[in-house]
Image: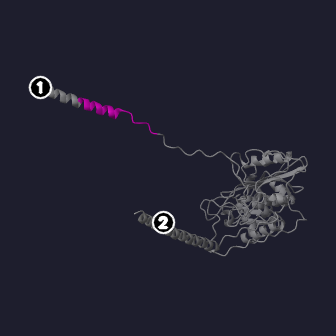
């Protein structure tokens, strides 16, 4: 082989080696850094819901589930009329925070959308937030059911539990088919442990669910609680349900006029009967009795606690009413649409009660109804005929279209006029 050929072959090999080396370098070179994928959005800091613009003046917030969808063929009840002037005084018609003149700032971390501090003896409303705003009661509506049951039923009567009692939706205290329960005990566990099965057993003796709801709503009306509409005996959400912090205070004050109600909500624990084995279930055995404890945590921790009622549904969120006594004063707090952030509702209630006890004894922003309160049955607003709004909208759209067409025609005429004028001027210059 000639030297020149050797040189050419060597050059070709060198080129190939360099190409391979460069390929390796490129493949080994790190790629440009990519930005990390975005993480979950940072939740906004907590802030107390703003109600200054009265968003719940006529009805509760939109539901988040299907609990308030009317049954086929039914329609949702119209919102309750809004009393004018507001029950309890003009200031209670305000929707934001309502404080006495010169009152100190409120405690922090209150997440309840609506609340009210009330003197249970005098009926004075010490402070509030959106007191007449409409919200959902959850199980706090059982206060109305307890009043009716305590006044109308034979407390010593013993009733037998049914499968219908046992299978109700929501919180159940433990009624079983064939079990034997006095009405006194059923009312006690109704308010102590929020038993929906107890509510069902009591409502059955009051004429059934529908008749019981009618009784509850008549009672609310007689108490001037005109923001209230019970939809179920237990407080489960259903079409038309409504209550306000003011009305819950009214109902709770009425319940406390019944000594046995105060005894029940102040009870920490009670023994609940068992029930016999179900012969249709192979191997089932008799179910023994068991203790039922009060689910109101402030009863165990807040000085001078009288007791109260808790509630929760997905739509209502946390609801709460509680009373306590200190230095000869009996105050109650109601919370509606509260949440567990930044602190749990019982602690929010405790902070507000401390705030109320620190206010001067004559401080107030309104009052609960009394025997001198005149009936205030508001007149419902006249509804617009179906489709009226759409007709108006269509009319507005038609007027707008006509205006646009007219302007367009004028514009065309102006352009044509300018073109003709320009043509004539050009001809004169020629």
Q: Are marks 2 and 1 in contact (CB under 8 Å)?
A: no
For marks 2 and 1, give the one nearer the viewer: 2
Mark positioned earlier in the residue sequence (2 or 1): 1
Q: Residue at x 74, y 53 (%)?
A: 292
Image quadrant for the N terminus? top left
Q: Nearer the viewer, residue 137 or 259?
A: 137
Estimate how packed mark 1 is, as few (under 14), some (14 to 19) or many (20 or more) residues with alpha carbons within 10 Å: few
- The count of marks equals 2
State the image coordinates of residue 248 (x, y, percent, origin top left): 79, 59
- In the picture shown, does residue 411 fall above or below 174? below
**SS of the residue under disc 2:** helix
State the image coordinates of residue 315 (x, y, percent, origin top left): 66, 58
Image quadrant for the C terminus? bottom left
In the rendered structure, find residue 16 and report the number of the disc placed on it.
Answer: none
Estimate how packed mark 2 is, as few (under 14), some (14 to 19) or many (20 or more) residues with alpha carbons within 10 Å: few
Residue extent of the magenta highlight: 17-34
In the rendered structure, find residue 4 and report the number of the disc placed on it.
Answer: 1
Q: Is residue 91 magenta?
A: no
Determine the image quadrant of residue 197: bottom right
- CA distance for labels 2 and 1: 85 Å
Q: Main secondary structure of the magenta part?
A: helix
Determine the image quadrant of residue 195: bottom right
Q: Nearer the viewer, residue 123 or 149?
A: 123
State the image coordinates of residue 56 (x, y, percent, origin top left): 72, 60
Is residue 246 something that shows in the picture?
yes
Is residue 156 something that shows in the picture?
no
| Residue carrying label 2 | 418
Left or right relative to 119: residue 273: left
- In the picture shown, does residue 12 fall above or below 56? above
State the image coordinates of residue 45 (x, y, percent, origin top left): 65, 45
Q: Is residue 24 magenta?
A: yes
**SS of the residue under disc 1:** helix
């Amino acid at each position: 082989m000639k030297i020149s050929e050797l040189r050419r072959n060597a050059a070709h090999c060198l080129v190939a080696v360099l190409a391979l080396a460069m390929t390796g370098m490129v493949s080994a070179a790190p790629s440009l850094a990519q930005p990390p994928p975005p993480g979950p959005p940072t939740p906004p800091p907590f802030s107390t819901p703003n109600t200054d613009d009265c968003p719940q003046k006529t009805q509760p917030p939109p539901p988040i589930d299907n609990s308030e969808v009317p049954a086929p063929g039914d329609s949702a009840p119209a919102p309750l009329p809004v009393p004018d002037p507001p029950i309890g005084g003009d200031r209670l018609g305000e929707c934001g925070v309502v404080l006495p003149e010169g009152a100190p700032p409120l405690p922090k971390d209150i997440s309840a959308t609506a609340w009210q501090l009330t003197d249970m003896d005098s009926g004075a409303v010490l402070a509030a937030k959106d007191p007449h705003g409409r919200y959902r009661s959850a199980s706090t509506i059982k206060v109305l059911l307890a009043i009716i049951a305590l006044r109308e039923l034979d407390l010593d009567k013993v009733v037998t539990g049914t499968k219908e009692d046992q299978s109700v939706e929501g919180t159940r205290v433990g009624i079983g088919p064939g079990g034997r329960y006095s009405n006194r005990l059923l009312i006690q566990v109704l308010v102590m442990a929020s038993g929906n099965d107890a509510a069902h057993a009591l409502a059955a003796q009051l004429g059934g669910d529908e008749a019981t709801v009618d009784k509850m709503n008549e009672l609310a009306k007689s108490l001037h609680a005109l923001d209230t509409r019970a939809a179920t005996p237990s407080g489960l959400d259903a079409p038309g349900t409504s209550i306000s912090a003011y009305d819950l205070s009214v109902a709770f004050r009425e319940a406390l006029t019944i000594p046995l109600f105060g005894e029940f909500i102040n009870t920490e624990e009670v023994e609940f009967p068992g029930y016999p084995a179900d012969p249709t279930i192979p191997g089932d055995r008799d179910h023994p009795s068991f203790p039922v404890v009060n689910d109101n945590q402030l009863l165990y921790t807040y000085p001078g606690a009288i007791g109260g009622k808790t509630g929760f549904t997905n739509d209502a969120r946390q609801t709460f009413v509680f009373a306590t006594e200190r230095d000869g004063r009996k105050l109650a707090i109601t919370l509606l649409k509260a949440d567990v952030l930044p602190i749990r509702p019982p602690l929010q209630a405790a902070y507000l009660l401390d705030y109320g006890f620190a206010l001067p004894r004559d401080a107030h922003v309104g009052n609960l109804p009394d025997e001198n309160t005149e009936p205030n049955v508001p007149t419902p607003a006249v509804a617009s005929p179906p489709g009226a709004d759409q007709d108006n909208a269509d009319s507005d759209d038609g007027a707008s279209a006509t205006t646009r067409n007219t302007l367009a025609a004028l514009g065309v005429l102006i352009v044509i006029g300018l073109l003709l004028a320009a043509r004539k001027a050009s001809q004169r210059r020629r």
